[in-house]
Amino acid sequence: MPLPSANASPPTVLVVMGVSGSGKTTIATLLAKKLGWTYRDGDEFHPPANVEKMQGGVPLTDEDRWPWLKAIAAFIDDELKHRTKTIVTCSALKRRYRDIIVDGRTGVRLVYLRGDKTLLETRLKRRHGHFMPSSLLQSQFDALEEPGSDENPLTVSVEGTPDQIVDEIMERLGLSPSK
């Protein structure tokens, strides 16, 4: 993948996306720390009813997701308005979801964490204290519409270590660590 051109402006909001277990929280947290940016977990924007459904092993419907996605979009708009450099996680599995949170917003860039189902399933089974059970992973892969080139995603494999993944993201986006 080519590095950004000298004329390209680096993003000010990164949306770290992918299915459950892809490392969104781990990567976004580490990336925010290295860059000195604000970080928000997209799960914080879920209404309690959504969390309850997922804890019960029930996949969310599009109707369940609309208020959640609109809340993330409003947060991103506020961050852009205040010129706050921010990273937010969101599964953003379908194009129509990404259209709500990213489309038309200058300075927002998708970072798609792509991983093999077997690897991610292993990670989910080791994870404790999260409301998303590994049993819902297949439903996420079924719903996943990988971002197209017209969405200008930065697609990164999750097979490396978190530090390797974060370093690759920073290099490919032309972002420097905070001092």
Image (spheres, helix red, strand yellow):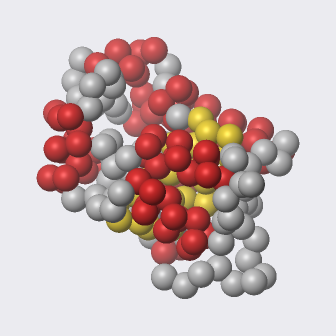
The image shows residue 61, relative to residue 19, as above or below, that is above
Looking at the image, which is closer to me, 85 or 29? 29
Taking the image as drawn, is residue 144 in sight?
Answer: yes
Q: Give the residue at the far front of this rendering.
A: 179
Looking at the image, which is closer to me, 171 or 56? 171
The image shows residue 92, relative to residue 56, as above or below, that is below
The image quadrant that residue 69 belongs to is top right
| Residue 105 screen position, x and y as percent | 71, 56
| Residue 103 screen position, x and y as percent | 62, 57
Split into 4 quadrants, where in the image is the C terminus?
A: bottom right
Looking at the image, which is closer to me, 75 or 2? 2
Taking the image as drawn, is residue 102 in sight?
Answer: no
Name the residue: 54% across, 59% down: 110
Looking at the image, which is closer to me, 64 or 90? 90
Q: Give the residue at the far right of this rendering.
A: 82
| Residue 56 screen position, x and y as percent | 24, 17
Name the residue: 57% across, 71% down: 171
Name the residue: 48% across, 30% down: 43
| Residue 176 screen position, x and y as percent | 68, 64
Instruction: Locate residue 177 relative to residue 172 in the image: left or right.
Output: right
Name the residue: 68% across, 40% down: 38
Instruction: Locate residue 90 relative to residue 8 in the image: left or right.
Output: left
